[in-house]
Amino acid sequence: MMLDGSAVVVRHALSTDLPAMVALLANDRLGALREMPTPAGMGSYLAAFESIDKDPAHQLLVCEHAGEVVAMAQLSFIPGLSRGGSWRAQIEAVRTRADYRGRGLGREFIWWAIGQARTRGCSLVQLTTDKSRTEAHRFYAQFGFTASHEGLKLPLD
């Protein structure tokens, strides 16, 4: 991907990217309420990172531009019995740094993730986004995502 005449690299995240990734998660109205981007809170993020990183069905991805992490996502590949026993891809934790929003990076990143799903033979790409994120709903609609299902969650706190 190119941005402002220089390359943006999509790569697997490294544990050294974790502070930047947690900062991206915390840098919005909802994330500010639930994320802990402090050194004391990093232990749980590191444990989660290591579990995800070990599992080949999951990928933590970052976009790097000019040596900095400017976007992230988690891409998971899930086998299923429905749809003829096909695989699906789940896109989660999509974040773009505020100063990079509106410049086309997020669009290219999502198209890249959809391409990865095709390469892995998935028949479906799915994602969830909070009902209050109406701008995100419009963003994902441009790719053809539709609100075809009602998602339910049960917090276990």
Image (cartoon, grey):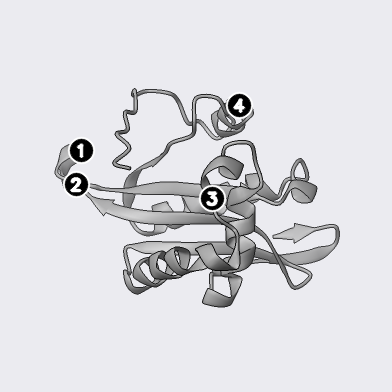
Return the x and y of residue 61 as percentages of the image width and height: 53, 63
Q: How far apart in space, not on screen, are marks 4 and 1 (Cα)? A: 27 Å
Res 83 label: 1
Q: Which residue is mark 3?
A: 35
Residue 28 drawn at (x, y percent): 65, 41
Contact flag, marks 3 and 1 (Cβ < 8 Å) = no
Left or right placement of residue 70 versus residue 77 in this view: right
Q: SS class of the residue under badge 1?
A: helix
Q: Residue 31, image x and y in percent? A: 57, 43
The residue depicted at 31 percent of the width and 28 percent of the height is 152
For label 4, the residue is: 138
Q: Amino acid at mark 2?
A: Gly
Q: Tell which residue pokes out farthest to the front in this image.
A: 40
Q: Amino acid at mark 4?
A: Arg
**Residue in view at x 61 percent, y 32 percent:** 139
Name the N-terminal-most of marks 2 and 4. 2
